Amino acid sequence: MDQFSYDPLNALSADDFTGQRAGARDSLMLTAQLRIEGKPDVAQVRVRNLSSGGMMAEYAAPVSSGTPLEVEVRGVGWITGRIAWSAEGRVGVAFDHDIDPMLARKPVGKGASTPAFVKPLVTRR
């Protein structure tokens, strides 16, 4: 069999590719605070996806791969990590320790009910 022949017994499935990542990515849109080592300021970034091992965020400033950083994600807190890649106004961040990305999706309010100003107005005709 030549190297370009299709062999169904050795074909890769979609599961083979998802296993190469540390965890499933959760696409979302939230803001986070990013602190790059060696820079005094804290930047606000938009998080595009989040997993237990890292995230992708919009960050326009140039930054080198491997640069240490800290990021504060709502519901999770401050996380240490490193820049994994940087391209076209976005960065990939690899966390030093796994997190629970579902904590970022938890509601921030602690009220017992929905406030009246949030409820839709229902009128009869």
Image (cartoon, helix red, strand yellow):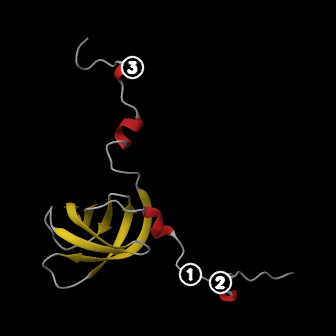
Which residue occupies 40% across, 55% down?
25
User: Which residue does the numbered mark 3 point to in the structure image?
Assistant: 8
Residue 9 figure quarter:
top left
| In the depicted structure, whether residue 48 falls above or below residue 39 | above
User: Which residue does the numbered mark 2 point to in the structure image?
Assistant: 118
Which residue occupies 63% across, 83% down?
111
Q: x, y percentage for residue 100? A: 42, 62
| In the depicted structure, whether residue 4 falls above or below residue 41 | above
User: Which residue does the numbered mark 1 point to in the structure image?
Assistant: 109
- Mark 2–mark 1 contact, CB under 8 Å? no
Quarter in which the N terminus is drawn:
top left
Type of residue at label 1? Gly
Crowdedness of circle 3 by 10 Å Cα count: few (<14), some, many (20+)? Answer: few
Kind of element beneath mark 1: loop
First of labels 3, 2 by sequence position: 3
Type of residue at label 2? Val
For marks 2 and 1, give the one nearer the viewer: 1
- Mark 3–mark 1 contact, CB under 8 Å? no
- Left or right of 57, for residue 2: left
| In the depicted structure, whether residue 60 falls above or below residue 25 | below
* Number of marks in picture: 3
Distance from the alpha carbon under mark 3 to that under mark 2: 55 Å
Crowdedness of circle 1 by 10 Å Cα count: few (<14), some, many (20+)? Answer: few
Numbered tag placed on residue 61 in the rendering:
none
Type of residue at label 3? Pro
Q: x, y percentage for residue 69? A: 21, 71
First of labels 2, 1 by sequence position: 1
Q: Residue farthest to the right?
A: 125
Of residue 67 and residue 118, the one placed in the foreground of this image is: 67
